[in-house]
Image (cartoon, helix red, strand yellow):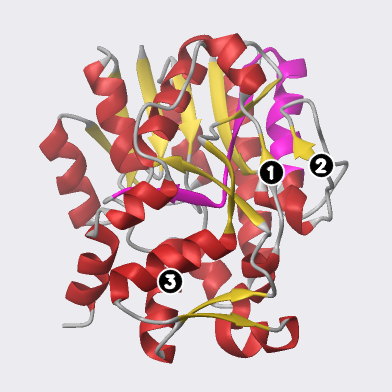
Amino acid sequence: MRVFVTGASGHLGSAVVPELLQAGHQVVGLARSDASAAALEAVGAEVHRGDLDDLDGLASAAAGADGVIHLAFKHDLMFAGDFGGAVAADLRVIEALGGALAGTGKPLVGTSGTALFALAGFDGTLTEADTLEAGPRIDAENAVVALADRGIRASVVRLPPSVHSHLDRNGFIPTFITIARNEGFSAYVGEGTNRWPAVHTLDAARAYRLAVESAPAGARLHAVGDEGVPFRRIAEAIGRGLHLPVTSIPAEQAGEHFGVLAGQAAADGHATSALTSALLGWAPTHPGLIDDIDQGHYVDAAHDDTH
């Protein structure tokens, strides 16, 4: 299968591309810089130069492929304060990809997140059967699934808030480590019993491969390893790694300590991947979140980034 991958040189893409290649697929990766292009070529992938604003180019690359995995998102725009603009851009990309694949029966795998449900106040264990009618990025999930009605084998992989490994340099865990180092202690909110689902990057990559290979049209999938790690345990693992004290802070101080991530640090989410495992035969095989933090590569990377 010839697979077009957006976000191919990013954190998750840098695992998805080798996973596809090792399974015998050809990969065409979207690259907007010389460095990204070189990284893709180094592992044996073809390069499609462009970005998420080049809708015609994205459609052309999708039309020339046997399937598409859409990982990219305008995180730079989001972190600059224009989350709405990033969400709108993602919807335009999905429409362009869908237009190119309509009526072909080819697979298109999109990306969503379990944290969207936690932040929306979802109560209980999130399953693949649970949905939301609308919301930021939820609209993108629903738009991908709706492409099944246009003759596309469309599916969505929901990722937990922590996709962790040595490949993760800019996610939540590296950010929380930086905050702890700067503040002199690792914190959790209240009793720290709020839970975070998590998955190892390499396990997530395998879920995407299985989805593009065989997920049925309209499927919502979960790449969830740890179903819900208490945030206190995450804070304690960070504290161990940095040799810093671990402290509870009241909810009213979360914004001062965690900044824009205060909501995420206090959010409670529990998710299962049981239906995905039954459907695709997927199961996590790599270390869980706490064991991965305890390996020390996160702290070592954060230390290197400060020098």
Label 1 to label 2: alpha-carbon separation: 7 Å
**Vertical arrangement, residue 288 with respect to residue 254, above or below:** above
The residue that appears at 30% across and 68% down in the rendered structure is: 241
| Rendered-image quadrant of the C terminus | bottom left
The residue that appears at 74% across and 37% down in the rendered structure is: 126
Q: Are marks 2 and 3 in contact (CB under 8 Å)?
A: no
For disc 1, the marked residue is 270
Q: Nearer the viewer, residue 173 or 242?
A: 242
Identify which amino acid the numbered label 3 is placed on.
Thr
Residue 68 in the image: state x and y as whole percent. Answer: 47, 26
Q: Give the range drawn in magenta.
A: 139-165
Q: Do the residues labelled 1 and 2 touch (CB within 8 Å)?
A: yes
* Disc 3 element: helix
Query: Of marks 1 and 3, which one's residue comes earlier in the chain?
Result: 3
Query: Of marks 2 and 3, which one's residue comes earlier in the chain?
Result: 2
Q: Nearer the viewer, mark 1 or mark 3?
A: 1
Residue 109 in the image: state x and y as whole percent. Answer: 55, 27
* Disc 1 element: strand
Q: Which of marks 2 and 3 is in front?
A: 2
The residue that appears at 54% across and 12% down in the rendered structure is: 280
Label 2 to label 3: alpha-carbon separation: 27 Å
- Horizontal placement of 307 versus 157: left or right? left
Q: Quadrant of residue 30?
A: top left
> Does the stretch in magenta take in 88?
no
Res 34 label = none
> Does the stretch in magenta take in 140?
yes
For disc 2, the marked residue is 124
Q: Nearer the viewer, residue 279 or 16?
A: 279
* Disc 2 element: loop
Residue 6 in the image: state x and y as whole percent. Answer: 42, 40
**Vertical arrangement, residue 293 with respect to residue 59, above or below:** below
For disc 3, the marked residue is 175
